[in-house]
Image: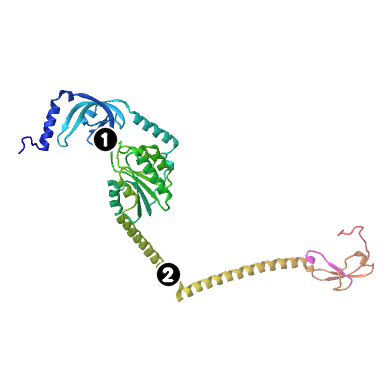
Amino acid sequence: MAKNLFRVKEINLYIQGLLADDGLLQNVWIEGEVSGFRSHSSGHWYFTLKGEDAALKCIVFRQWTKGVFFLPEDGMEVRVRGTVAVYARDGQYILYGEEIVAVGTSNQYAQFCALKERLYQEGLFDEGRKKPLPIYPKKIAVVTSADGAAWQDMQKIFRQKIPAEIMLYPCSVQGINSESSIIQGIKAINQRRGIEVLIISRGGGSKEDLAVFNTEGVTRAIAESAIPVISAVGHEIDYTLADLAADVRVPTPTAAANIVLPDKGQVLALIEAEKNRLLVVMRDYVISLQEDLAILASRCSLGTVLSQQQLRLQRAMQKLLQTMVQAKEAKQLQFQKQAMRLSMADPLQVLGRGYGIASLSPGGAPVKSSQDLKVEESLYLQLVDGEVHCKVEEVRTLEKPLDA
């Protein structure tokens, strides 16, 4: 057996000891650009320090992060003081930071911020221009890598959903040609008829792996899409420009598959609940109709009809009798008025007030003018209680008649 044979753990521990004995690697300052920053729920910070052609994993434990008055961001230039050591389990050397200070912002990060601000000012990220997702889309397109884990995971989720036509547009999501590939996919999907939702997807990765989703071309293509776009590029903390331009942003590809279509079980449960609700409504409606029919039937029975008709007849007779009484009273009042008028016009009634009626013969026509009389002529005067035979001795005619 070889004398120099070691277990993996043994060699890692040996290297760990070598680094621990190297004073140069203790309490050393290292400068670089923050990449893949992640703040864990425990309070520890995990990120990578990147230089021109090199990278170094870095961990700053919670007891040291409390003294830092800023939150590192990807692209930020920082200096970290700490110790370089080997993590024996993974065989990876790591900078364990105890102090971190900001130096500045890299040119690449500054360009990203400038592009983001320019597109924001153009309105590409406005909430008002975002389109709602259909509730039950029949055709869905996915722009992603055909070989990536994201597409495989999404297919598993789609099988649990209600049926829909899922179309894959394979493209490159990382590398030199990825921008044009994604843009071409977005435009091609928009030219197809019937597509209701477009999902742009990629699995998780570092800031550099997701760089294509921060390009101006991809961002504009998403904003110009007539089809609602879901951005699902597999990262939790940072937002890419693609996320900001998309109509809906989700943290992972599986989340996109989950929100775009409802589960079969949920739909079946909704259908069952709606069916039960309709059955209750129909039952209540039938009961209501039965009650109405019962009321109508009771109203239409012979005894009820006769009773109702008898009541109507009694009311009609009472109304007729009342009308007749009122008519009789009115006629009596009218008769009394006419009798009074006739009584006032009766000559005998006039004689009773001291007047008399003169005539040339008994019961003859009344004398109306003094010119109809002659001296020595007989005159008969009718009084209220008898008749007087007179003789005209003198006739005097008034210059002005009494009725003039």
Q: Position of residue 27 (x, y in %)?
A: 19, 24
Residue 353 belongs to magenta span: yes
Q: Is residue 249 above or below residue 137?
A: above
Q: Amino acid at mark 2?
A: Leu
What residue do we see at 82% from left, 64% from top?
Answer: 355
The residue that mark 1 highlights is 38
The one of 119 and 180 positioned closer to us in this rendering: 180
Numbered circle sitting on residue 293: 2
Quarter holding the C terminus is: bottom right
Q: Position of residue 244 (x, y in %)?
A: 38, 39
Q: Is residue 394 above or below residue 37?
A: below
Question: Residues at badges 2 and 1 in contact (C-beta under 8 Å)?
Answer: no
2 or 1: tag closer to the N-terminus? 1
The one of 339 and 110 positioned closer to us in this rendering: 110
Q: Amino acid at mark 1?
A: Arg
Label 2, label 1: how far apart the Cα atoms are:
73 Å
The one of 40 and 48 positioned closer to us in this rendering: 48
Range covered by the magenta-colored residues: 349-360
Say which quarter of the image contains residue 378.
bottom right
